[in-house]
Image: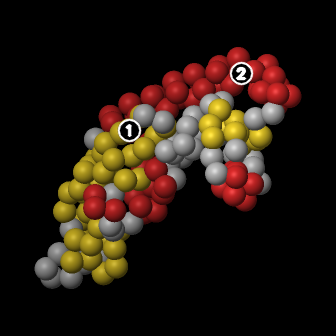
Amino acid sequence: MKIILLDNIDKLGNKGSEVVVRSGYARNFLIPKSKAMLATKKNIEIFKAQQLELQSKAIEAQTQAEFCAKTINRLGSITIKAKSGVEGKLFGSIGSRDIATAITAASGFNISKSQIRLPNHDVLRTIGTYSINIHIYNDIFSKINVIILDEIV
């Protein structure tokens, strides 16, 4: 089934691209979630008319994402305090939600937990310094060091 993507979808395509997908994937997921529309002649003409406006929005989003990445890179590192045992093992763990909250507070940019790329796709369970990647926009990534310290009670 031929569709036009209305949103950037990983491993499928970018906004505005015309792709062929399985009909069930299109009917049950992409079209109901407004991520795609059928590639009929009428829809293709409508979409081409909106193409210029979409390109300007994409350029604006790209520049804003680059500014966000530069700001986060300038931070260098963030510190998160957590309770830990004698051996440096945390009571609980530090996950992507905790890191996203700390980065949002430090940078002023809204970073969601889905943008955080943890090492080994796992939570952080010990005191130390970790290098974390942040997926800002399509091909824009930022790197920040997360320092986990013992919380003194």
Can see residue 134? yes
Mark number, residue 141: 1
Closer to the observer: label 2 or label 1?
Answer: 2
Q: Residue furthest right?
A: 42
Question: Looking at the image, how many numbered discs can be counted on the residues?
Answer: 2
Q: Tell which of 93 and 29 is nearer to you.
A: 29
Residue at 36% from the left image edge and 39% from the top image edge: 142
Q: Check the image and report above or below for 113 versus 9.
A: below
Q: Quadrant of the C terminus?
A: bottom left
| x and y percentages locating residue 72 in the rendered image | 38, 39
Is the residue 65 above or below the residue 87 in the image? above
Residue type at mark 1?
Answer: Phe
Instruction: Please name the residue shown 59% across and 39% down the image.
Output: 8
Q: Amino acid at mark 2?
A: Gln
Q: Position of residue 55 (x, y in %)?
A: 64, 21
Instruction: Out of 40 and 104, give the one closest to the viewer.
Output: 40
**SS class, disc 2:** helix
